[in-house]
Amino acid sequence: MALQVSGTGFGLIHGSRGGFRVRGVASESMPAKKVEGGKVKLGGTEVKVTKLGIGAWSWGDTGYWNDSQWDDRKQKEAKAAFDASIDGGITLFDTAEVYGAGIMMGAVNSETLLGDFIKERKKNDSVEVAVATKFAALPWRFGRGSVLSALQASLSRIGLSSVDLYQLHWPGFWGNEGYIDGLGDAFEKGLVKAVGVSNYNEKQLRDAYARLKKRGIPLAANQVNYSLIYRNPEINGVKATCDELGITLIAYSPMAQGILTGKYTPERPPTGPRGKVYTPEYLTKLQPLMTRIKEIAQNYSRSPTQVVLNWLTCQDNVIPIPGAKNAEQAKEFVGALGWRLTDEEVEELRSLAAQIPPATGLPFE
Ligand SMILES: NC(=O)c1ccc[n+]([C@@H]2O[C@H](COP(=O)([O-])OP(=O)(O)OC[C@H]3O[C@@H](n4cnc5c(N)ncnc54)[C@H](OP(=O)(O)O)[C@@H]3O)[C@@H](O)[C@H]2O)c1
């Protein structure tokens, strides 16, 4: 089950691995390579984060991911994903109070897992981890006070006294002003280093920015669905508004939930909720784009995954947050940084992708 979010509505819906490989792809047998290229500031704040973060939605989740089952093996793999990310120099992690939570029919809260992984790691390592989490604007939550109380609960699950980024997960059912004021309160109390929103359209984004600005608080980020095959932010004004106002666009589902890695094919489509959206028919239409992605990947001795993530980092002011379930996936993300597609390749992939109809029925939108 996953939360269904739109600009105006909210609801609940019910919600194999292949092996495409090319030369030079990071794998478990390769030593972790440190990420290159340093850090970037989140919007107009002083908070610095890596140019790519790790999404932790699948950790502990049984409503959408993990074939409805969570066990010790999967938990160990998630911990290995966390450690491999840190080893590779990626230190930004994105979670949310609803990931893995009971309301989403989850098994273990993702915030709790992330907090445990951080605690364990810090026993032997002084690494600085940047945590981004989110407030769920559930219809029965009213006003600014609900933001502070939800944040306190998140901090206690994660085991931190503050987080680097606190985001409103989706627009409020009854309006956003109270939630924005609550974000501002959290910032002024020092409980969060930066504030952001998620799934906000251009108008909602401008309103949130202006309301926070009156208090001298920068709106640091808007987290939205953005990938080669989901380029709505380029069309609906969200990307341009982020650029204009100095707000970082955090790109979620940057690999279209694994589809752009190339491992799912018309003969082997994904199972579970993803299979309803990425059908064999859709995957057939995707083939010309995937073929070109694979060719480009081969030319750079990279993997398709690294190419599609690099494409996002080439869009300036964009931080992708791919989800990693295990160390191998996390290691692969490290190789998405430290190099760059040419401008011609970026545009070629965009125009090839434009010929593919948008996937419909995604859990978020
Ligand atoms: N704000 C929001 O409303 C919102 C909504 C969605 C997501 N998010 C955030 O964005 C993050 C990422 O989005 P997402 O998880 O939806 O999609 P994604 O990052 O595009 O895809 C993640 C999935 O792709 C597969 N994968 C990952 N690395 C791979 C690799 N190297 N090779 C092959 N397959 C790989 C894994 O699933 P399999 O191995 O099962 O294929 C993984 O769970 C989430 O964790 C969450 O933090 C936010």
Image (spheres, rainbow, N blue to C red):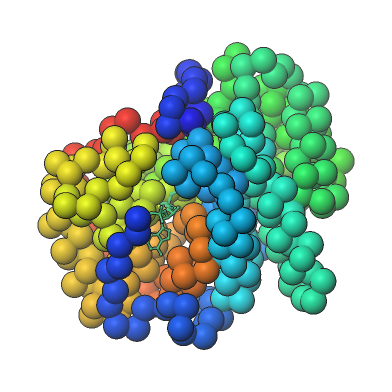
**Closer to the camera in the image, 78 or 24:** 78
Coordinates of residue 205 in the picture (x, y in percent): 54, 33
Could you tell me which quadrant the C terminus lies in? top left
User: In the drawing, does residue 144 fall left or right of residue 334?
Assistant: right
Q: How many marks?
A: 0
Q: Is residue 356 among what the camera can see?
A: no
User: In the drawing, does residue 254 fall left or right of residue 98?
Assistant: left
Q: Is residue 254 among what the camera can see?
A: yes
The answer to which image quadrant residue 235 occupies is: top left
Name the residue at 69% across, 19% down: 141
As drawn, 72 above or below 188: below
Coordinates of residue 14 in the picture (x, y in percent): 43, 27
Name the residue at 19% across, 72% down: 295
Name the residue at 64% across, 46% down: 110
As drawn, 45 above or below 69: below
As drawn, 308 above or below 286: below
**Closer to the camera in the image, 247 or 354:** 354
Coordinates of residue 70 in the picture (x, y in percent): 56, 47
**Closer to the camera in the image, 200 or 14:** 14
